[in-house]
Amino acid sequence: MTLTGQCRCAALRYTVEPAGKPRVYACHCLNCQRWSGSAFGLHMLLSETAMSITGALAEYRHEHAGLQSRQYLCAQCHTRIFNTTDAAPGMRVLRAGTLDEAAALAPVAHIWTRRKHAWLEVPPDVPSWPESPSPEAFASAVMGR
Ligand SMILES: [Zn+2]
Ligand SMILES: [Zn+2]
């Protein structure tokens, strides 16, 4: 299944081909709230080979918890599109709200609900964790493994 997306100004467009059915998850951590300027971040975990991009990217590198994190933005309007981290080599974390089909993708998991805004209710049948789940639990929930 091929999905498409773009930044706010449309100078950058991309396609992704997730392995299996597309799965997005919500992260309610403080960093995601600040990055997004919203109540949570909406992410899709992808292999770097599953994504192709047209348009120029700007890069912002920083260190997080001792690991190198790279954030990639549209070079023109600075919409953040995805990031990589040394913690997950070969993977990209797509900002799923930039997908054209985003509204049709309900999160399959909620993480860092300890920081969740009180007004927002996670459906009881959707897995959630107060902080980061174990890598195994995370893979099972967001990768369908
Ligand atoms: Zn743009
Ligand atoms: Zn987060």
Image (cartoon, helix red, strand yellow):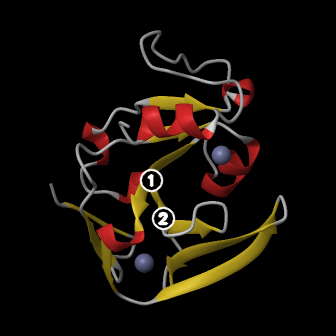
**What residue lies at 45% left-to-right and 14% top-to-bottom?**
123
Q: Tag 1's secondary structure?
A: strand
The quarter of the image holding the C terminus is: top left
The relative height of residue 63 versus residue 75 in the rendered view (above or below) is: above
Name the residue that disc number 1 marks: 45
Q: Amino acid at mark 2?
A: Arg
Q: Is residue 36 left or right of residue 48?
A: right
Q: Is residue 98 left or right of residue 89?
A: left
User: Residue reaching furthest right?
Assistant: 66
Name the residue that disc number 2 marks: 92
Q: Amino acid at mark 1?
A: Leu
Front residue of this view, candidates 26 and 20: 20
The answer to whether residue 39 is seen in the rendering is no
The relative height of residue 65 versus residue 7 in the rendered view (above or below) is: above
The quarter of the image holding the N terminus is: bottom left
Q: Are marks 1 and 2 in contact (CB under 8 Å)?
A: yes
The relative height of residue 142 versus residue 18 in the rendered view (above or below) is: above
**What residue lies at 75% left-to-right and 43% top-to-bottom?**
30
